[in-house]
Image: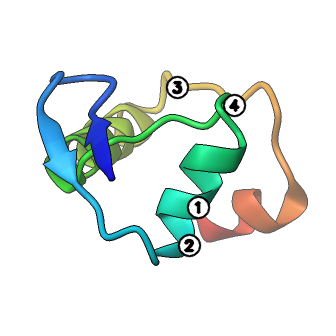
Amino acid sequence: MRVKCVICDTIHELPNDLPLAKKLRNRPIHTFMCDECNVRVTNNTHKRIETGKFQFFRTSSKFDEEF
């Protein structure tokens, strides 16, 4: 299955038997993000959290305990 990253617009090939491929086929609202973009977004989010000026609008007690 060919998928396109929503951030960098690169096309990747996923095996048809992966659960992610099935999820993307059956639920078109789900989007695909490549590993490189996922790592970049995660790192930038952690940097923003460390500044102390980042606020979560939907927080859970479990998430607040981690940071």
Q: Between disc 1 and disc 3, whose residue precedes? A: 1
Residue type at tag 2:
Pro
Foreground residue among 62 and 20:
20
Check contact, mark 2 vs mark 1: CB within 8 A. Answer: yes
Check contact, mark 3 vs mark 2: CB within 8 A. Answer: no
Residue at 27 percent of width and 33 percent of height: 5
Q: Between disc 4 and disc 1, whose residue precedes? A: 1
Name the residue furthest right.
61
Is residue 1 toward the left or the right of residue 58 in the image? left
Foreground residue among 42 and 8:
8
Quadrant (top left/top right/bottom left/bottom right) for the C terminus:
bottom right
Q: How crowded is mark 4: few (under 14 residues within 10 Å), some or many (20 or more)?
A: few
Q: Name the residue under label 1.
A: 22
Tag 3 secondary structure: loop
The numbered dot on residue 54 is 3
Check contact, mark 4 vs mark 3: CB within 8 A. Answer: yes
Q: Between disc 3 and disc 2, whose residue precedes? A: 2
Alpha carbons under labels 4 and 3: distance apart: 7 Å
Tag 4 secondary structure: loop
Residue at 36 percent of width and 31 percent of height: 48
Q: In which quarter of the image is residue 49?
A: top left
Q: Name the residue under label 2.
A: 19
x and y percentages locating residue 34 in the rendered image: 24, 47
Q: Mark 4 points at which residue?
A: 56
x and y percentages locating residue 41 in the rendered image: 30, 38
Residue type at tag 1:
Lys
Q: In which quarter of the image is residue 29?
A: top right
Alpha carbons under labels 4 and 1: distance apart: 31 Å
